[in-house]
Image (spheres, rainbow, N blue to C red):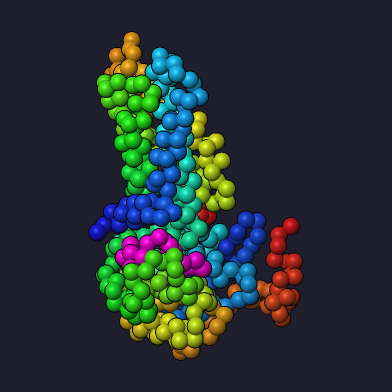
Amino acid sequence: MSPLAALLLRDMRIAVRVGGGALIGVLFFLAVVSVTPFAVGPDLALLKRIGPAILWLAALLASLLALDRLFASDHEDGSLDLILTGRAPLELVVAAKGIAHWLTTALPLVVAAPLIALLLDLDGSAEAGLVLTLLVGTPALTFIGLIGAAIAVTLRRGGLLLAIIVLPLTVPVLIFGVAAANAAIAGPVPFGTPFTVLCALTLASLVIGPFAAAAALRLDME
Amino acid sequence: MRLSAVDLACRRGDRDVFSGVSFNVGAGELLAITGRNGAGKSSLLRIVAGLIRPVGGRLWLEGGEPELSIAEQVHYLGHQDPVKPSLSVLENLQFWAAFFAGAIKVDDALELVGLGAIATLPAGYLSAGQRRRLSIARLIAVKRPIWLLDEPTSTLDAAAQHRVAEFMRTHLSEGGLVLTATHSALGLSSIQELSLDRSVRSHAHSDVAGMEQPAAVAP
Protein backbone atom coordinates (compact mmCIF):
# COMPACT_ATOMS: atom_id res chain seq x y z
CA MET A 1 0.00 0.00 0.00
CA SER A 2 1.33 3.42 -0.84
CA PRO A 3 1.99 5.88 2.01
CA LEU A 4 -0.83 8.15 0.91
CA ALA A 5 -3.36 5.33 0.58
CA ALA A 6 -2.35 4.15 4.06
CA LEU A 7 -2.89 7.63 5.46
CA LEU A 8 -6.27 7.99 3.74
CA LEU A 9 -7.42 4.64 5.09
CA ARG A 10 -6.19 5.43 8.61
CA ASP A 11 -7.94 8.80 8.75
CA MET A 12 -11.19 7.31 7.49
CA ARG A 13 -11.00 4.48 10.03
CA ILE A 14 -10.41 6.92 12.87
CA ALA A 15 -13.29 9.11 11.70
CA VAL A 16 -15.88 6.35 11.58
CA ARG A 17 -14.88 4.69 14.87
CA VAL A 18 -16.08 5.66 18.31
CA GLY A 19 -14.95 9.20 19.13
CA GLY A 20 -14.32 10.03 15.48
CA GLY A 21 -15.87 13.12 13.95
CA ALA A 22 -17.72 11.60 11.01
CA LEU A 23 -21.26 11.63 12.40
CA ILE A 24 -21.02 14.93 14.28
CA GLY A 25 -21.11 17.00 11.10
CA VAL A 26 -24.06 15.27 9.53
CA LEU A 27 -26.03 15.28 12.80
CA PHE A 28 -25.41 18.99 13.19
CA PHE A 29 -26.51 19.53 9.59
CA LEU A 30 -29.71 17.57 10.12
CA ALA A 31 -30.43 19.36 13.40
CA VAL A 32 -30.04 22.86 11.96
CA VAL A 33 -32.08 22.18 8.84
CA SER A 34 -34.86 20.32 10.62
CA VAL A 35 -35.49 22.99 13.27
CA THR A 36 -35.53 25.83 10.74
CA PRO A 37 -39.11 25.18 9.52
CA PHE A 38 -40.29 25.37 13.13
CA ALA A 39 -38.60 28.72 13.55
CA VAL A 40 -39.78 30.15 10.23
CA GLY A 41 -43.35 28.92 10.53
CA PRO A 42 -45.65 27.15 8.06
CA ASP A 43 -45.05 29.51 5.13
CA LEU A 44 -44.20 27.09 2.31
CA ALA A 45 -43.37 29.80 -0.23
CA LEU A 46 -40.90 31.42 2.15
CA LEU A 47 -39.32 28.07 3.07
CA LYS A 48 -38.86 27.23 -0.57
CA ARG A 49 -37.21 30.58 -1.20
CA ILE A 50 -34.74 30.38 1.70
CA GLY A 51 -34.34 26.59 1.63
CA PRO A 52 -31.10 26.43 -0.42
CA ALA A 53 -29.52 29.17 1.71
CA ILE A 54 -30.32 27.27 4.91
CA LEU A 55 -28.97 24.01 3.56
CA TRP A 56 -25.78 25.68 2.40
CA LEU A 57 -25.28 27.56 5.67
CA ALA A 58 -25.78 24.36 7.65
CA ALA A 59 -23.34 22.55 5.36
CA LEU A 60 -20.75 25.30 5.79
CA LEU A 61 -20.97 25.29 9.59
CA ALA A 62 -21.06 21.49 9.75
CA SER A 63 -17.92 21.24 7.65
CA LEU A 64 -16.14 23.63 10.05
CA LEU A 65 -17.07 21.54 13.09
CA ALA A 66 -14.61 18.68 12.88
CA LEU A 67 -11.97 20.63 11.02
CA ASP A 68 -9.98 21.88 14.01
CA ARG A 69 -8.98 18.31 14.94
CA LEU A 70 -7.73 17.54 11.44
CA PHE A 71 -4.07 18.32 12.11
CA ALA A 72 -4.24 19.12 15.83
CA SER A 73 -4.76 15.49 16.86
CA ASP A 74 -1.76 14.42 14.79
CA HIS A 75 0.28 17.25 16.23
CA GLU A 76 -0.55 16.43 19.85
CA ASP A 77 0.45 12.77 19.71
CA GLY A 78 3.60 13.35 17.66
CA SER A 79 2.24 11.76 14.48
CA LEU A 80 2.89 14.95 12.55
CA ASP A 81 6.62 14.79 13.38
CA LEU A 82 6.80 11.32 11.91
CA ILE A 83 4.73 12.30 8.89
CA LEU A 84 7.31 15.02 8.22
CA THR A 85 10.12 12.44 8.25
CA GLY A 86 8.23 10.31 5.73
CA ARG A 87 9.04 10.25 2.07
CA ALA A 88 5.63 11.42 0.88
CA PRO A 89 5.55 15.15 -0.03
CA LEU A 90 3.73 17.13 2.64
CA GLU A 91 1.43 18.73 0.05
CA LEU A 92 0.13 15.33 -0.98
CA VAL A 93 -0.13 14.21 2.65
CA VAL A 94 -2.29 17.26 3.35
CA ALA A 95 -4.41 16.56 0.27
CA ALA A 96 -4.88 12.92 1.33
CA LYS A 97 -6.03 14.05 4.77
CA GLY A 98 -8.38 16.54 3.12
CA ILE A 99 -9.90 13.85 0.91
CA ALA A 100 -10.37 11.53 3.89
CA HIS A 101 -12.03 14.36 5.80
CA TRP A 102 -14.34 15.16 2.90
CA LEU A 103 -15.31 11.52 2.42
CA THR A 104 -16.16 11.05 6.08
CA THR A 105 -17.76 14.38 6.99
CA ALA A 106 -19.02 16.13 3.85
CA LEU A 107 -20.12 13.21 1.70
CA PRO A 108 -22.62 11.90 4.30
CA LEU A 109 -24.05 15.40 4.37
CA VAL A 110 -24.53 15.42 0.61
CA VAL A 111 -26.22 12.03 0.88
CA ALA A 112 -28.53 13.26 3.65
CA ALA A 113 -29.47 16.46 1.80
CA PRO A 114 -32.25 15.03 -0.43
CA LEU A 115 -34.07 13.63 2.61
CA ILE A 116 -33.82 16.78 4.64
CA ALA A 117 -34.77 18.95 1.63
CA LEU A 118 -38.29 17.50 1.92
CA LEU A 119 -38.71 19.53 5.10
CA LEU A 120 -38.09 22.68 3.07
CA ASP A 121 -40.69 21.84 0.41
CA LEU A 122 -38.24 21.33 -2.44
CA ASP A 123 -39.38 19.17 -5.35
CA GLY A 124 -37.42 16.65 -7.41
CA SER A 125 -35.51 18.80 -9.87
CA ALA A 126 -34.79 21.44 -7.23
CA GLU A 127 -33.41 18.73 -4.94
CA ALA A 128 -31.22 17.36 -7.72
CA GLY A 129 -29.81 20.82 -8.41
CA LEU A 130 -29.21 21.46 -4.73
CA VAL A 131 -27.48 18.13 -4.13
CA LEU A 132 -25.30 18.71 -7.19
CA THR A 133 -24.17 22.11 -5.86
CA LEU A 134 -23.37 20.57 -2.47
CA LEU A 135 -21.48 17.71 -4.07
CA VAL A 136 -19.37 20.09 -6.12
CA GLY A 137 -19.07 22.87 -3.53
CA THR A 138 -18.25 21.00 -0.30
CA PRO A 139 -14.74 19.93 -1.45
CA ALA A 140 -13.97 23.65 -1.72
CA LEU A 141 -15.11 24.16 1.89
CA THR A 142 -12.93 21.27 3.10
CA PHE A 143 -9.84 22.31 1.17
CA ILE A 144 -10.12 25.96 2.19
CA GLY A 145 -10.63 24.70 5.72
CA LEU A 146 -7.33 22.78 5.48
CA ILE A 147 -5.49 26.09 5.46
CA GLY A 148 -7.16 27.28 8.65
CA ALA A 149 -6.68 23.90 10.32
CA ALA A 150 -2.97 24.02 9.50
CA ILE A 151 -2.56 27.57 10.81
CA ALA A 152 -4.40 26.79 14.06
CA VAL A 153 -2.62 23.47 14.63
CA THR A 154 -0.45 24.51 17.56
CA LEU A 155 -3.19 26.39 19.39
CA ARG A 156 -5.04 24.67 22.22
CA ARG A 157 -8.43 26.12 21.41
CA GLY A 158 -7.97 26.62 17.71
CA GLY A 159 -11.62 26.13 16.78
CA LEU A 160 -12.73 29.73 17.05
CA LEU A 161 -9.66 31.10 15.31
CA LEU A 162 -10.21 28.54 12.61
CA ALA A 163 -13.73 29.80 12.01
CA ILE A 164 -12.51 33.40 11.84
CA ILE A 165 -9.79 32.52 9.34
CA VAL A 166 -11.85 30.19 7.21
CA LEU A 167 -15.29 31.79 7.05
CA PRO A 168 -14.36 34.88 4.99
CA LEU A 169 -12.56 32.66 2.48
CA THR A 170 -15.62 30.48 2.05
CA VAL A 171 -17.98 33.37 1.27
CA PRO A 172 -17.55 33.11 -2.53
CA VAL A 173 -18.30 29.39 -2.37
CA LEU A 174 -21.42 30.12 -0.34
CA ILE A 175 -22.59 32.86 -2.72
CA PHE A 176 -22.22 30.80 -5.88
CA GLY A 177 -23.44 27.60 -4.25
CA VAL A 178 -26.67 29.22 -3.12
CA ALA A 179 -26.99 31.11 -6.42
CA ALA A 180 -26.70 27.88 -8.41
CA ALA A 181 -29.18 26.11 -6.14
CA ASN A 182 -31.65 29.00 -6.47
CA ALA A 183 -31.19 29.04 -10.21
CA ALA A 184 -32.08 25.36 -10.31
CA ILE A 185 -35.26 26.04 -8.32
CA ALA A 186 -36.61 29.37 -9.56
CA GLY A 187 -34.38 30.86 -12.22
CA PRO A 188 -34.19 33.35 -13.87
CA VAL A 189 -30.40 32.90 -14.26
CA PRO A 190 -29.54 29.66 -16.08
CA PHE A 191 -28.18 27.01 -13.68
CA GLY A 192 -24.95 26.70 -15.61
CA THR A 193 -23.66 30.20 -14.96
CA PRO A 194 -23.21 30.20 -11.17
CA PHE A 195 -22.55 26.45 -11.22
CA THR A 196 -19.53 26.87 -13.49
CA VAL A 197 -18.11 29.50 -11.16
CA LEU A 198 -18.67 27.14 -8.24
CA CYS A 199 -16.76 24.41 -10.08
CA ALA A 200 -13.93 26.86 -10.75
CA LEU A 201 -13.78 27.84 -7.07
CA THR A 202 -13.57 24.18 -6.08
CA LEU A 203 -10.82 23.42 -8.58
CA ALA A 204 -8.83 26.45 -7.44
CA SER A 205 -9.13 25.52 -3.77
CA LEU A 206 -8.14 21.91 -4.52
CA VAL A 207 -4.87 23.27 -5.88
CA ILE A 208 -4.20 26.14 -3.49
CA GLY A 209 -5.41 24.47 -0.27
CA PRO A 210 -2.79 21.70 0.03
CA PHE A 211 0.11 24.00 -0.84
CA ALA A 212 -0.97 26.73 1.58
CA ALA A 213 -1.73 24.24 4.34
CA ALA A 214 1.61 22.46 3.88
CA ALA A 215 3.46 25.78 4.03
CA ALA A 216 1.57 26.70 7.21
CA LEU A 217 2.40 23.34 8.81
CA ARG A 218 6.10 23.74 8.02
CA LEU A 219 6.07 27.15 9.68
CA ASP A 220 4.19 25.80 12.71
CA MET A 221 6.70 23.04 13.28
CA GLU A 222 9.65 25.43 13.55
CA MET B 1 27.93 5.58 6.68
CA ARG B 2 28.90 8.55 8.79
CA LEU B 3 26.80 11.34 10.26
CA SER B 4 28.72 14.48 11.11
CA ALA B 5 27.87 17.87 12.52
CA VAL B 6 30.05 20.91 12.96
CA ASP B 7 29.22 23.92 15.11
CA LEU B 8 25.48 23.35 15.27
CA ALA B 9 23.59 26.13 17.01
CA CYS B 10 20.00 26.09 18.11
CA ARG B 11 17.70 28.91 19.09
CA ARG B 12 14.15 28.50 20.35
CA GLY B 13 12.19 31.73 20.49
CA ASP B 14 14.72 34.31 21.69
CA ARG B 15 16.71 31.89 23.81
CA ASP B 16 19.99 30.38 22.62
CA VAL B 17 19.74 26.73 23.58
CA PHE B 18 23.20 25.61 22.51
CA SER B 19 25.90 26.51 20.08
CA GLY B 20 29.14 25.00 18.82
CA VAL B 21 27.94 21.42 19.02
CA SER B 22 29.94 19.03 16.87
CA PHE B 23 29.85 15.26 16.60
CA ASN B 24 30.89 12.49 14.32
CA VAL B 25 29.12 9.15 14.40
CA GLY B 26 30.02 6.24 12.17
CA ALA B 27 28.27 3.00 11.28
CA GLY B 28 27.80 0.79 14.33
CA GLU B 29 28.37 3.65 16.77
CA LEU B 30 26.13 5.09 19.41
CA LEU B 31 26.13 8.70 20.51
CA ALA B 32 24.67 9.33 23.95
CA ILE B 33 23.58 12.95 24.31
CA THR B 34 23.59 14.05 27.93
CA GLY B 35 22.83 17.25 29.70
CA ARG B 36 20.58 18.84 32.28
CA ASN B 37 16.90 19.47 31.56
CA GLY B 38 16.58 22.17 28.94
CA ALA B 39 20.14 21.73 27.67
CA GLY B 40 18.77 21.00 24.21
CA LYS B 41 18.98 17.21 23.93
CA SER B 42 15.58 16.96 22.29
CA SER B 43 16.25 20.00 20.12
CA LEU B 44 19.46 18.43 18.83
CA LEU B 45 17.60 15.26 17.88
CA ARG B 46 14.85 17.29 16.22
CA ILE B 47 17.48 19.18 14.21
CA VAL B 48 18.91 15.90 12.93
CA ALA B 49 15.37 14.72 12.11
CA GLY B 50 14.86 17.90 10.08
CA LEU B 51 12.01 19.05 12.30
CA ILE B 52 13.68 22.29 13.34
CA ARG B 53 16.29 24.27 11.52
CA PRO B 54 19.61 25.04 13.20
CA VAL B 55 20.56 28.72 13.25
CA GLY B 56 24.15 27.85 12.50
CA GLY B 57 26.50 25.01 11.67
CA ARG B 58 26.40 22.14 9.27
CA LEU B 59 25.04 18.61 9.32
CA TRP B 60 25.83 16.01 6.70
CA LEU B 61 25.68 12.32 6.02
CA GLU B 62 28.25 10.33 4.07
CA GLY B 63 27.39 6.99 2.57
CA GLY B 64 23.61 7.20 2.87
CA GLU B 65 21.07 7.08 0.08
CA PRO B 66 22.07 10.04 -2.11
CA GLU B 67 18.49 10.57 -3.33
CA LEU B 68 17.09 10.97 0.17
CA SER B 69 17.45 13.71 2.75
CA ILE B 70 18.79 12.86 6.21
CA ALA B 71 15.28 13.22 7.61
CA GLU B 72 14.05 10.53 5.25
CA GLN B 73 16.62 8.07 6.58
CA VAL B 74 15.98 8.49 10.29
CA HIS B 75 13.64 6.93 12.77
CA TYR B 76 12.61 9.62 15.23
CA LEU B 77 11.30 8.36 18.55
CA GLY B 78 10.14 11.47 20.39
CA HIS B 79 8.57 12.11 23.78
CA GLN B 80 5.11 11.29 22.53
CA ASP B 81 3.87 8.00 21.23
CA PRO B 82 2.02 8.49 17.94
CA VAL B 83 -0.64 5.94 18.77
CA LYS B 84 -4.29 6.41 17.81
CA PRO B 85 -6.54 5.12 20.61
CA SER B 86 -9.42 4.09 18.34
CA LEU B 87 -7.25 1.87 16.13
CA SER B 88 -6.04 -1.54 17.23
CA VAL B 89 -2.42 -2.16 18.16
CA LEU B 90 -1.86 -3.94 14.87
CA GLU B 91 -3.59 -1.26 12.78
CA ASN B 92 -1.43 1.43 14.38
CA LEU B 93 1.76 -0.37 13.49
CA GLN B 94 0.51 -1.38 10.04
CA PHE B 95 -0.19 2.25 9.25
CA TRP B 96 3.30 3.45 10.12
CA ALA B 97 4.90 0.52 8.32
CA ALA B 98 2.87 1.29 5.18
CA PHE B 99 3.44 5.03 5.51
CA PHE B 100 7.20 4.56 5.67
CA ALA B 101 6.94 1.95 2.89
CA GLY B 102 9.62 -0.19 4.41
CA ALA B 103 10.12 -3.92 4.63
CA ILE B 104 6.93 -4.82 6.41
CA LYS B 105 7.37 -7.37 9.17
CA VAL B 106 4.61 -6.04 11.34
CA ASP B 107 3.65 -9.26 13.14
CA ASP B 108 7.26 -10.15 13.97
CA ALA B 109 7.86 -6.66 15.29
CA LEU B 110 4.84 -6.88 17.60
CA GLU B 111 6.04 -10.25 18.91
CA LEU B 112 9.51 -8.83 19.53
CA VAL B 113 8.24 -6.00 21.69
CA GLY B 114 5.87 -8.34 23.49
CA LEU B 115 2.58 -6.99 22.14
CA GLY B 116 1.76 -9.96 19.88
CA ALA B 117 -0.91 -11.29 22.22
CA ILE B 118 -2.90 -8.04 22.25
CA ALA B 119 -2.55 -7.09 18.59
CA THR B 120 -6.30 -6.70 18.09
CA LEU B 121 -6.92 -4.65 21.23
CA PRO B 122 -7.80 -0.96 20.66
CA ALA B 123 -4.66 1.01 21.43
CA GLY B 124 -6.61 3.24 23.80
CA TYR B 125 -6.39 0.49 26.42
CA LEU B 126 -2.59 0.39 26.41
CA SER B 127 -0.52 1.58 29.34
CA ALA B 128 2.19 4.20 28.85
CA GLY B 129 4.86 1.53 28.72
CA GLN B 130 2.92 -0.53 26.19
CA ARG B 131 2.38 2.53 23.99
CA ARG B 132 6.11 3.15 24.09
CA ARG B 133 6.77 -0.45 23.09
CA LEU B 134 4.34 -0.04 20.18
CA SER B 135 6.35 3.01 19.06
CA ILE B 136 9.55 1.03 19.32
CA ALA B 137 8.02 -1.75 17.21
CA ARG B 138 7.97 0.77 14.36
CA LEU B 139 11.78 0.95 14.41
CA ILE B 140 11.95 -2.80 13.96
CA ALA B 141 9.20 -3.15 11.35
CA VAL B 142 10.73 -0.54 9.04
CA LYS B 143 14.45 -0.46 8.35
CA ARG B 144 16.06 2.95 8.52
CA PRO B 145 19.77 3.40 9.21
CA ILE B 146 19.72 6.23 11.75
CA TRP B 147 17.80 5.97 15.01
CA LEU B 148 17.10 9.16 16.97
CA LEU B 149 15.83 8.14 20.38
CA ASP B 150 14.61 10.74 22.85
CA GLU B 151 14.51 9.15 26.31
CA PRO B 152 13.59 5.81 24.76
CA THR B 153 13.21 3.93 28.03
CA SER B 154 11.55 6.54 30.23
CA THR B 155 8.28 4.65 30.76
CA LEU B 156 9.62 1.11 30.44
CA ASP B 157 10.17 -1.47 33.17
CA ALA B 158 13.58 -3.06 33.71
CA ALA B 159 12.92 -6.05 31.44
CA ALA B 160 11.70 -3.86 28.59
CA GLN B 161 14.66 -1.49 29.02
CA HIS B 162 16.93 -4.47 28.67
CA ARG B 163 15.05 -5.51 25.52
CA VAL B 164 15.43 -2.02 24.02
CA ALA B 165 19.17 -2.07 24.70
CA GLU B 166 19.23 -5.38 22.84
CA PHE B 167 17.40 -3.87 19.85
CA MET B 168 19.93 -1.06 19.81
CA ARG B 169 22.82 -3.53 19.91
CA THR B 170 21.33 -5.47 16.99
CA HIS B 171 20.81 -2.27 15.03
CA LEU B 172 24.41 -1.19 15.68
CA SER B 173 25.79 -4.59 14.71
CA GLU B 174 23.93 -4.32 11.40
CA GLY B 175 25.79 -1.08 10.70
CA GLY B 176 23.19 1.34 11.94
CA LEU B 177 23.68 4.58 13.87
CA VAL B 178 22.00 5.48 17.13
CA LEU B 179 21.74 8.94 18.66
CA THR B 180 20.03 8.85 22.01
CA ALA B 181 19.19 11.45 24.60
CA THR B 182 19.16 9.68 27.88
CA HIS B 183 19.63 10.02 31.60
CA SER B 184 19.96 6.35 32.31
CA ALA B 185 22.89 4.22 31.28
CA LEU B 186 21.73 1.57 28.84
CA GLY B 187 24.53 -0.89 29.48
CA LEU B 188 25.92 -0.57 26.00
CA SER B 189 29.56 -0.50 25.03
CA SER B 190 31.07 1.55 22.19
CA ILE B 191 29.39 4.71 23.39
CA GLN B 192 30.47 8.19 22.49
CA GLU B 193 29.18 10.79 24.84
CA LEU B 194 28.19 14.31 23.87
CA SER B 195 27.49 16.60 26.79
CA LEU B 196 25.48 19.71 26.09
CA ASP B 197 26.35 21.12 29.54
CA ARG B 198 29.81 22.34 28.61
CA SER B 199 29.01 26.01 28.34
CA VAL B 200 27.37 26.21 31.76
CA ARG B 201 29.09 23.32 33.51
CA SER B 202 30.77 25.50 36.12
CA HIS B 203 27.38 26.72 37.34
CA ALA B 204 25.43 23.52 37.02
CA HIS B 205 26.61 21.42 39.92
CA SER B 206 23.07 20.36 40.53
CA ASP B 207 19.82 20.51 38.61
CA VAL B 208 18.60 23.27 40.90
CA ALA B 209 21.59 25.43 40.14
CA GLY B 210 21.06 24.72 36.47
CA MET B 211 17.46 25.84 36.62
CA GLU B 212 18.31 29.05 38.42
CA GLN B 213 21.02 29.86 35.93
CA PRO B 214 19.81 33.16 34.44
CA ALA B 215 22.64 33.52 31.93
CA ALA B 216 20.91 31.03 29.64
CA VAL B 217 17.99 33.36 29.10
CA ALA B 218 18.52 36.23 26.72
CA PRO B 219 17.29 39.60 27.99
The answer to whether residue B62 shows anywhere in this view is: no
> Where on the picture, by quarter, is residue A189?
top left
| Image point (40%, 60%), residue name | B86
| Image point (61%, 67%), residue name | B18
Quadrant of image for the N terminus of chain B: bottom left
| Image point (45%, 24%), residue name | A37
Q: Is residue B37 left or right of residue B203?
A: left
Frontmost residue, A58 versus A48 = A48
Q: Examine the structure image and report whether residue B111 is included in the region drawn in magenta.
A: no
In the image, residue B129 sits, relative to residue A30, either above or below, namely below
Magenta part of the chain: B77-95
Residue B154 x, y percent position in the rendering: 53, 77
> Where on the picture, by quarter, is residue A178?
top left
Residue A83 x, y percent position in the rendering: 40, 58
Q: Is residue A48 left or right of residue B218?
A: left
In the image, residue A22 sits, relative to residue A116, either above or below, namely below
Frontmost residue, A111 versus A9 = A111
Residue B85 x, y percent position in the rendering: 43, 62
Q: Is residue A160 left or right of residue B86?
A: right
Frontmost residue, B62 versus B40 = B40
Residue B138 x, y percent position in the rendering: 36, 70
